[in-house]
Image (cartoon, rainbow, N blue to C red):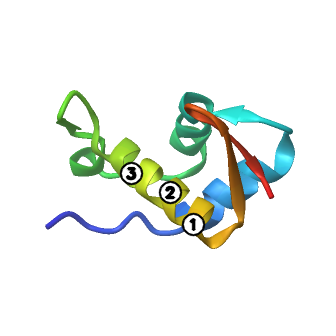
Amino acid sequence: MRERIEGLTQTIRQVLEVGDTIGWREICDEIKTRIYMTPEQKEITYGQPNFQHSVRRILSELVKRGEVIRVSRGKYKKA
C-alpha cells in the first residue's frame, strides 16, 4: 500500500480558494509544485501518475460534502 500524501486535501482546498472555476489538470499541476511526493506516488498507474487518482478521489469527496461544486466535466470551484 502506498503512503498517504500528507496535506493533499488541504492543498486542494487552497488551490480552489484562488480562482473561480479551475480544471482538474490545473489542480494537479499546482499540487505538483506545492507538495513533495515520493517516486512511488508519481509512479504511472492506469496511464497517469498515482497522485492524480488521489486528487480525483478527494475532489469527489469534497463535492459530496458540499465544499466544492463540479461545474462541468473536469471543472471545479469552491462552494
**Circle 2: element type:** helix
Q: Position of residue 78 (x, y in %)?
A: 78, 54
Q: Quadrant of residue 14?
A: bottom right
Q: Which residue is mark 3?
A: 37
Residue 58 coordinates in the image, percent (x, y): 49, 60
Amino acid type, label 2: Ser
Q: Which residue is mark 1?
A: 64
In terms of secondary structure, where does tag 1 sit? helix
Q: If you read the primary sequence from the N terminus, does the residue marked by circle 2 or circle 3 appear first?
A: 3
Crowding around mark 1 (Cα neighbors within 10 Å: few <14, some 14 to 19, many 20+) is few
Of 29 and 33, which appears nearest the observer?
A: 29
| 3 vs 54: above or below | below
Q: Check if mark 3's residue and mark 1's residue have beta carbons within 8 Å.
A: no
Give the alpha-carbon distance from disc 2 to disc 3, as whole Å.
21 Å
User: Residue at 56% across / 44% down in the picture?
Assistant: 31
The answer to the question of whether label 2 and label 1 lie on touching residues, with beta carbons closer than 8 A, is yes
68 vs 41, nearest the viewer: 68
What numbered label is drawn on residue 60?
Answer: 2
Dot 3 or dot 1, earlier in sequence: 3
Amino acid residing under circle 1: Lys
Please name the residue shown 34% across and 68% down the image.
4
In this rendering, position of residue 62 left or right of residue 20: left
Query: In 3D space, how far apart are the residues under numbered discs 2 and 1 (Cα atoms)?
Result: 6 Å
